[in-house]
Image (cartoon, rainbow, N blue to C red):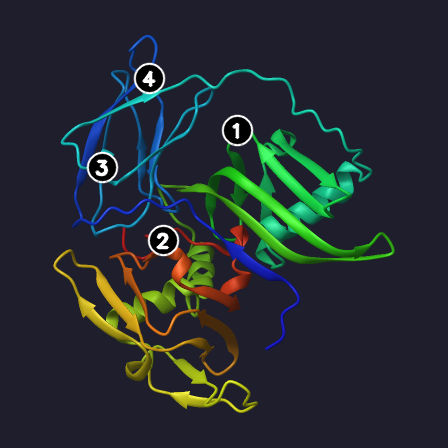
């Protein structure tokens, strides 16, 4: 399989090993100790979240063990990501700091790209090159700052406020707290192409219409889910790869041009933990090619002779640096992303 663009997404991740449970607490201003109403609290990459009441209090329940950051976000304040130690408290007390008003970052190097040109590259690499991307609308595109560095041949993006997106294809509104974004180009002004994309941040999914989900959204979500990385991870945890039409292939020798099929049980050794998570061990180094229904091709590359990771009750795996994905798995961008609790909560 040939790929021109190497794509990696690093999600902000803290690890919460627990059964499905309840989290509650209150959010206060760090200086005045006054309660903050309307603060968003959510598990990263999910629809699991809530807002604080007039007393600054909140409560969230999860149905499964979950490996995701608990994000606290409020306009005008610094976003806070709660770690494992924080979440062990019986009641969470979170103090938010006011985001200082600063002048725009000074850029010494001249940026000779137009806003239109930069926006074209940002939009296609952030949303993805899919039919669904054409049905995504940015609600606050003016908040997104784009800078092109000629000396580095890179495009950088930043936003003080969460990027707000309406995905009319899947029926979600997404609030994305962008932490880092860069596109690395190769070539020159006469011929330039994307070599690598990197971005990180936290995201909250919400239904466009919470009262009734349209049938077209249900169908579109099923189509996106089937064969996705989330689907693949859940099948590993449930030992149901073959039943769900996933096939695995490897090269018998590193220099071989031939691929041979291999049984999932010969690749993935799984063990159910008391926390309802699944521990996965792969005694193999190199690339494993994955086919879904005989045509959709992806890959997992393993750097170590033995790789061990865990999968939570929603299908999230950790540590995220253990696996390098490519192919269809690697093309997954914002326009074709589902919340990690899809089909569960």
Residue at 63 percent across and 70 percent down: it is 3
Which quadrant holds residue 281? Answer: bottom left
Q: Which residue is mark 2?
A: 340
Residue at 72 percent across and 46 percent down: it is 152
Answer with mark 2 or mark 4, whichever residue precedes in sequence: 4
Answer with mark 4 or mark 3, whichever residue precedes in sequence: 4
Distance from Cα at disc 2 to Cα at disc 4: 28 Å
Mark 3 vs mark 2, foreground winner is: 3
Above or below — where is 137 with respect to 230?
above
Distance from Cα at disc 4 to Cα at disc 3: 23 Å
* CB under 8 Å between discs 2 and 4: no
x%, y% of residue 160? Answer: 55, 28
x%, y% of residue 52? Answer: 29, 24
Q: Residues within 10 Å of mark 4 (few under 14, many from 20)?
A: many
Q: Which residue is mark 3?
A: 85
Q: Which residue is mark 1?
A: 161
Answer with mark 1 or mark 2, whichever residue precedes in sequence: 1
Q: Secondary structure at mark 1?
A: loop
* CB under 8 Å between discs 4 and 3: no
Mark 1 vs mark 3, foreground winner is: 3
Distance from Cα at disc 3 to Cα at disc 2: 23 Å
Answer with mark 3 or mark 2, whichever residue precedes in sequence: 3
* CB under 8 Å between discs 1 and 2: no
Above or below — where is 249 with respect to 190?
below
Answer with mark 1 or mark 4, whichever residue precedes in sequence: 4
Q: Which residue is mark 4?
A: 36
Q: Which mark is residue 229?
A: none
Distance from Cα at disc 1 to Cα at disc 2: 23 Å
Task: Please indicate whether residue 102 sits to the left or right of residue 37 in the image.
Answer: right
């Amino acid at each position: 399989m040939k790929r021109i663009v190497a794509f990696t997404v690093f999600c902000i991740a803290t690890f919460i090993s627990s059964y499905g449970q309840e989290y509650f607490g209150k959010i206060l201003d760090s200086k005045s100790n006054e309660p903050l109403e309307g603060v968003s609290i959510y598990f990263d990459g999910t629809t699991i979240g809530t807002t604080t009441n007039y007393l600054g209090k909140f409560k969230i329940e999860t149905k499964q063990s979950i490996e995701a950051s608990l994000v606290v976000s409020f306009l005008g304040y610094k976003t806070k990501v709660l770690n494992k130690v924080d979440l062990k408290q019986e009641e969470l007390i979170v103090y938010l700091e006011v985001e200082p008003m600063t002048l725009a970052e000074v850029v010494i190097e001249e940026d000779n790209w137009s806003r239109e040109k930069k926006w074209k590259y940002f939009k296609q690499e952030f949303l993805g090159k899919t039919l669904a991307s054409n049905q995504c609308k940015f609600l606050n595109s003016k908040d997104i700052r784009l800078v092109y560095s000629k000396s580095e041949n890179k495009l950088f993006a930043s936003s003080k406020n969460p990027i707000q997106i309406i995905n009319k294809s899947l029926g979600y509104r997404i609030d994305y707290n962008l932490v880092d974004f860069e596109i690395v180009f190769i070539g020159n002004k006469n011929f330039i192409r994307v070599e690598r994309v990197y971005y990180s941040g936290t995201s909250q999914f919400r239904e466009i219409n919470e009262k009734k989900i349209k049938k077209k959204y249900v169908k579109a979500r099923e189509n996106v889910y089937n064969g996705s990385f989330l689907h693949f991870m859940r099948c590993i945890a449930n030992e149901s790869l073959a039943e769900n039409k996933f096939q695995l292939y490897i090269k018998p020798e590193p220099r071989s041009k031939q691929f041979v099929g291999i049984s999932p049980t010969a690749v993935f050794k799984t063990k159910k933990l008391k926390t309802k998570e699944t521990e996965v061990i792969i005694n193999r180094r190199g690339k494993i090619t994955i086919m879904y229904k005989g045509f959709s091709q992806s890959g997992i590359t393993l750097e170590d002779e033995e790789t061990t990771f865990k999968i939570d009750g929603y299908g999230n795996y950790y540590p995220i640096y253990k696996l390098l994905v490519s192919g269809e798995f690697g093309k997954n961008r914002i326009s074709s992303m589902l919340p990690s609790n899809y089909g569960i909560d």
